[in-house]
Image (tube, grey):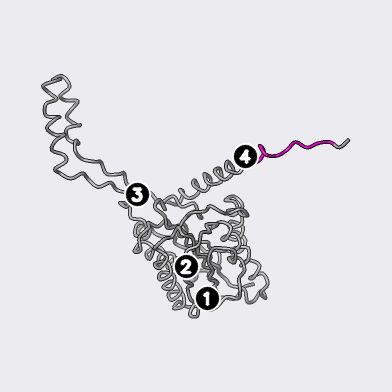
Amino acid sequence: MTKPGRSVIALLLDRSSSLGPLRDDVRAATAHLLAHQAGLPGEVEVYLTTTGRRAGKLRGGIPATDAAVPKLRGRSTEAVRDSLGALVSGLGRSLAGMPEQERPTRVFVVLVTGGTDAGSATWGPDELRDLIAAQERDYAWEVVTVTVAEHAGLAPWGAGHRSLGVAPRGDCVRAAIAAASEYIGRARAAGPWEPVAGISQEERWAAYPPDFHAVPEAPADTAAAPAEITAEAPVVAPADTTAQAPAEATVGTTPAAPVDDAPTEAIPVLTAQRLAEADRAAAAERRRWWDRFRKPATVGS
């Protein structure tokens, strides 16, 4: 039994140095998200925390109108997986302690991160994925991940239509968090487990433009010299004139990087698997390194 029209939004903001100068954009966009949610019909309660040791130590939620976004002072910690696992576990315990008639109908966990994890020791990728899948399957939670990174199209946090990669630009950060807020609004208007339209391809492009990694063409004056060289090619080898024609047409220009217009839903799953394999390989390497210093056990006389 749940309270109709009541929702909970738990926001986890990355305060590691990986966000760099974009921390102010994250704060501003998160404030707009809270204002947007406060203006929608229904009751919404907010838990807002940052990455670090206190991520899972949640106090009571507060109305979205009263929530204030903390300053994201840079920290060296990059244990995003541990922070997300602690938040999900802590929020689950908090909601389980409520009377059934007061529990929310919809629960949203929003992670905004720079995409780097270098210190997680408690929650591995597989364990975190299983935890989130259980909450989504059994309690209709919605986990929305916003990853701000140079190659954010390969975001390892989350999967499917609620995972959003963001180019490291202020306008892209604001567009991504706005898209996440729109998704939450649609889901709040629906019942538990009802299908909800995910983040659209247009919203994904606004957050991570297809031409973000396009290679610019070389200046026209640099193309002149190579063109003169290829003009003499028929004199040296007349028989290869036809074979050289395509090369002459492209000499002096740098081809643009191919643009992948396909949705990114399937990409995070692949990178999460690679991340898990890398973690397991790193753990095995550490074990081998320490084994060199372990003394063999001795049997007492």
| Distance from the alpha carbon under mark 4 to that under mark 1 | 50 Å
Residue at position x 60%, y 76% from top?
60
Q: The disc labelled 4 sits on which kind of residue?
A: Trp
The answer to the question of whether label 3 and label 4 lie on touching residues, with beta carbons closer than 8 A, is: no
Mark 4 vs mark 1: which is more N-terminal?
A: 1
Front residue of 62/187: it is 62
Which label sits in the foreground, 2 or 1? 2
Mark 3 vs mark 1: which is more N-terminal?
A: 1
Percent across and percent down for residue 263 are 40, 51
Query: Mark 1 sits on what residue?
Result: 44
Q: The disc labelled 3 sits on which kind of residue?
A: Asp
Residue at position x 25%, y 41% from top?
255
The answer to the question of whether label 2 and label 1 lie on touching residues, with beta carbons closer than 8 A, is: no
Q: Is residue 100 left or right of residue 61?
A: right
Q: Which residues are magenta?
A: 284-299
Q: Is residue 96 left or right of residue 41?
A: right
The answer to the question of whether label 3 and label 1 lie on touching residues, with beta carbons closer than 8 A, is: no
Q: Is residue 215 above or below residue 133?
A: above
Query: Mark 3 sits on what residue?
Result: 261
Q: Secondary structure at mark 2?
A: loop
In what quadrant of the picture does the N terminus appear? bottom right
Q: The disc labelled 2 sits on which kind of residue?
A: Leu
| Distance from the alpha carbon under mark 2 to that under mark 1 | 24 Å
Residue at position x 61%, y 71% from top?
58
Q: Secondary structure at mark 3?
A: loop
